[in-house]
Amino acid sequence: MACILKDCYLAYILIEMFGCTSVVFTRNCKATHFLTIMLRHLGLRAIPISGRMSQSNRVGALNQFMVGECNILICTDAAMRGFDIPSVNLVIYYDIPTDMKDYIHQMGRTARSTVAIFLVKQYEMEWFIKIENIFGKKFPEFPCQHELVL
């Protein structure tokens, strides 16, 4: 899936799951800020957390998320280390973690979600298959119509 398609699918999923508390993991700070701006332009309440932010700004953004001022947290995995967010409904991996320890940390400690969705490009399939192998099962596809997403 090309990057522009990932953006379309991300927006589609978040609009379909409107009102859910969601955490979106990205690989870098640039993507975190870009996606936050894009989602805000679409009328969604998103807030970024990245390593380029001061610790006080990260804590402030997390507090806005925890009290419901924003329901979508866009973050890098490094920025989320040490935070514990028990009330997340949806985790979206905009970028698949390449280190399985990062994945386990994100799902196990950062967000105990009921739904996890991976946006997978063809070059990320190897990492995705490794994650499926950890769980010993094939994950179902998120139901959507490609034409509607675009």
Image: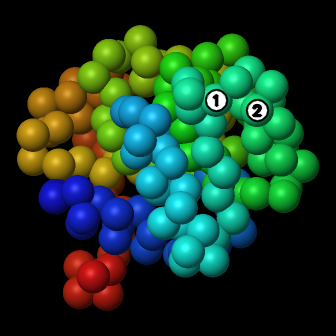
Q: Write the residue at 56% across / 46% down.
A: 74
Position of residue 19 measured from the top left corner of the image (x, y, whole percent)? 71, 68
Residue annotated with mark 2: 57
Q: Residues within 10 Å of mark 2 (few under 14, many from 20)?
A: some
Residue 112 visible here: yes
**Considering depth in this image, is 58 or 101 the residue closer to the camera?**
58
Residue annotated with mark 1: 53
Label total for image: 2
**Considering depth in this image, is 56 or 104 the residue closer to the camera?**
56
Q: Is residue 1 left or right of residue 57?
A: left
What separation in Å lies between label 1 and label 2 (alpha carbons)? 6 Å
Q: Residues within 10 Å of mark 1 (few under 14, many from 20)?
A: some
Residue 108 visible here: no
Vertical position of residue 139 compared to residue 71: above or below: above
Secondary structure of the residue carrying numbered label 2: helix
Q: Write the residue at 50% across / 26% down.
A: 77
The amino acid marked with disc number 1 is Met
Q: Is residue 92 left or right of residue 64?
A: left
Spot the residue most to the right.
Answer: 67
- C-beta proximity under 8 Å, tags 1 and 2: yes
The amino acid marked with disc number 2 is Asn
Specify the quadrant of the image occupied by residue 79. Answer: top right
Vertical position of residue 18 compared to residue 51: above or below: below
Position of residue 5 measured from the top left corner of the image (x, y, whole percent)? 24, 66
Specify the quadrant of the image occupied by residue 59. Answer: top right
Spot the residue most to the bottom.
Answer: 148
Q: Write the residue at 61% across / 25% down.
A: 80
Secondary structure of the residue carrying numbered label 1: loop
